[in-house]
Image (cartoon, helix red, strand yellow):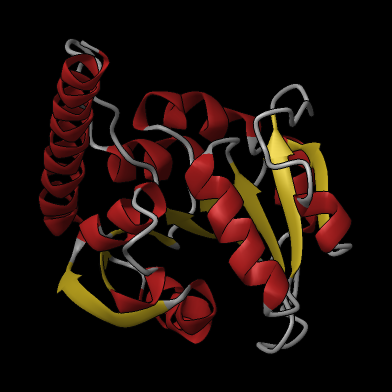
Amino acid sequence: MAYKTFVCMNIAVIGNGMVAEAIARSLAMAEHNIFIGLKDETYDTFSDDMFDEFDNIKVSSIEYAADVADVIILATHASEVREASYLLDDVRKKVIIDMSGFNYNGGSPYFNTLSAVTAITYSPHVIKCYSNDYSYALSNPFHTVESSKLYMAGESRKAKELFKLFANDLGVRECVDLGGADKSLVLDEMSMSNAYAIAYREQEREKVLVKVKR
């Protein structure tokens, strides 16, 4: 599929969590056409007003979203990346942005998501993007996404340059290129560390609430 313009693109956002919704909202506000790809096309995890507010956000199957998209953003949990990648169908010529993050669940095996996406999709245009600041902003109402610095890694110069074009639409202050695919391991470590930090904050918050109730 040829790119129409860099002003308005068809963007597939694969995922049904808080990060996927934040990405969809930000890009829709910048007048991109957003196709949220879901395995079963149910979206009860999203805010009720999102589809009333934006008529350029549509929900579809993962296959359809990937087919019509100029750019595919994987905004799933890391544990769902492999399955989502298989459902993308033929995306060998597509730009794929891996923005997946790890969950703290105490025992999920680690694997490098960038390598998995590249191996499954056969696309040469895959990069990993992650920012602890961005994830923290989505879970903390007193921190703004606009202050976020995002790091990326991968072999595709095309994917990196394309991502930079709409990074501002996501509220990213600065994109830092760490280098090739091997540097994606650093981003995975950032994601896992952030997951532990969020879990710790939640545990401490629960302790405070228990004390208050007493």
Q: Residue at x 20, y 16 (%)?
A: 109
Q: Nearer the viewer, residue 93 or 211?
A: 211
Which one is in front, 101 or 201?
201
Residue 150 at x, y percent in the picture: 28, 70
Residue 109 is left or right of residue 96, and the answer is left
Residue 102 % position (x, y): 28, 33
Residue at point 32%, 52% (across, down): 135
- Could you tell me if residue 148 is visible in this image? yes
Q: Position of residue 204 (x, y in %)?
A: 13, 27
Q: Is residue 1 left or right of residue 111?
A: right
Q: Is residue 72 visible?
A: no
Q: Quadrant of residue 52?
A: bottom right
The N terminus - image quarter: bottom right
Residue 166, given in percent of the width and then of the height, sits at 53, 80
Report the residue at 54% width, 79% height from top: 169
In the depicted view, which residue is nearer to us: 84 or 189?
Answer: 189
Q: Is residue 63 positioned above or below 164 on the image? A: above
Viewer-side residue, 168 vs 208: 208
The image shows a total of numbered marks equal to 0
Q: Write the residue at 82% across / 39% down.
A: 60
